Image (cartoon, rainbow, N blue to C red):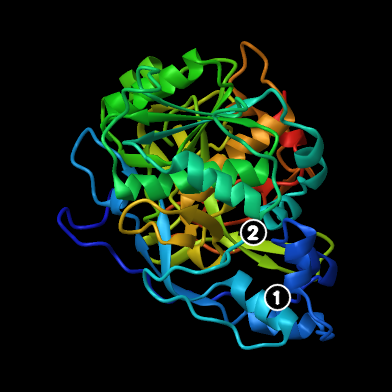
Amino acid sequence: MRTSPPNSPHIRGNWRRIGSAAAATAALLIAGLGTAAHASAATTPHKVSAKTIAAQVAKAHVQYEKAACGATPKKGFAACNALRVTGGTTAFMEKQAALKGVAPKTISPKAATDDPTGYGPSDIQSAYGLADAAAANGSGETVAIVDAYDDPNAAADLATYRSYYGLSACTVANGCFKKVSQTGSTTSLPSADSGWAGEESLDLDMVSATCPNCNILLVEAKSASDANLGTAVNEAVKLGAKFVSNSYGGSESSSDTTYDTSYYKHPGVAITASAGDEGYGAEYPAGSQYVTAVGGTALSTSSNSRGWTESVWKTSSTEGTGSGCSAYDAKPSWQTDTTCTKRMIADVSAVADPATGVSVYDTYGADGTGWGTYGGTSASSPIIASVYALAGTPGSSDYPASYPYAAAGTSALNDVTSGNNGTCSTSYYCTAKSGYDGPTGWGTPEGISAFTG
């Protein structure tokens, strides 16, 4: 990645404070509650005002660190864009505490928790207007996740996540889940890696949360090299996936245009890529002209008609969503901003701030302590890939990255107009504004209509 010293240890995030927002009572009561049993456990006879809940949510603050797969990669390799919360209280925890009329709990570093501490499926579906589509759509569609190395507990952890939230089983036995190597083998898998296992759990859980009826294909590259990850993308497409999420990235290079045609140019397939977690600056494969580059937001409850509000995710000058003007990749025809003559990052966005992070279940390795909360654009990429899946199979000759541009400026996208991810000479490269901007693109989903041809 761009700014971290090559041999630095995991980097602990600065304390993140979430701006106060009034809470929409209806959204709060359903948020994150996958079953009636969980809904019952999360509510009490206390009558809590929206103002009280909003004030409690505003207290949320966390500490976090890069997942072990996020260390600065050497040339020709990529790092994951996952951030794991290690301390403090998340927005979800503050909200639940206010509903129960109790003091919020605090996450202890590397400590297991009995219940989720981040946003769940109902939150994500509510925030992005997906509840109806998630219930009715997705059957027969396959979302592929491409990561490096093996997560031996992937199937079991996925089952636990889905069971907790009352989602249908997605297993190898029923044909919903499949794990393969970059060559398509189900038996000759890469070596296991704890850091990438956390990333894989995050990705699988975000597909489950957003498109619970979708099949899931996990393709594990034998290393985090650009060539092996790209080969895994090709294998995902070969195996029939029409939606492929890539939650990794590295510095741009002159080789990127070659990688474009070798690995990411797949008409008729929606390929998403994380914009990065180190603030303003372009990375690859988000810079590919053939992918949907996904930025990150901070997601909070609100009293507006939507029930939620978002701003650009930024923790510090070197921690926040990526964006930028590519140094190498050509500008796709559907991009119309004029200052950047090459490919501009990002296209759209979704939640990525660890303080407003998502729940993940992971039990493999040092970081696999059970329930945890994750952020980073590793969360937003699989969410957007799954929104594409809810919208249906792309046209066979289409590059679905163009779809949100056709819906630009309409109610199909939530325009994010506040916040920045750094300082840059061209304001929209790093600062949110009405309409298109680098950190959040055209905004976040409001339903599925912006993600279909």
314 left or right of 206 in image:
left
Q: Residue at x 75, y 57 (%)?
A: 35
Residue furthest to the left in view is 7
**Residues at marks 1 and 2 touching, judged by CB atoms closer than 8 Å:** no
Q: Residue at x 64, y 47 (%)?
A: 209
The 10 Å Cα crowd at callout 2, few under 14, some 14 to 19, many 20 or more, is some
Q: Which mark is residue 21?
A: 1
Q: Secondary structure at mark 2?
A: loop
Identify which residue, 423 or 153, lies in the foreground: 153
Q: Which residue is mark 2?
A: 417
216 left or right of 372 in image:
right
Residue type, label 1: Ala
- Which quarter of the rendering shows the C terminus? top right
Say whether residue 135 is visible: yes
Where is residue 403 drawn, in percent x and y?
Answer: 67, 29
Where is residue 303 drawn, in percent x and y?
Answer: 80, 71
Report, in whole angstroms, how far the alpha carbon at label 1 lies from the one at label 2: 15 Å
Q: Earlier in the sequence, mark 1 or mark 2?
A: 1
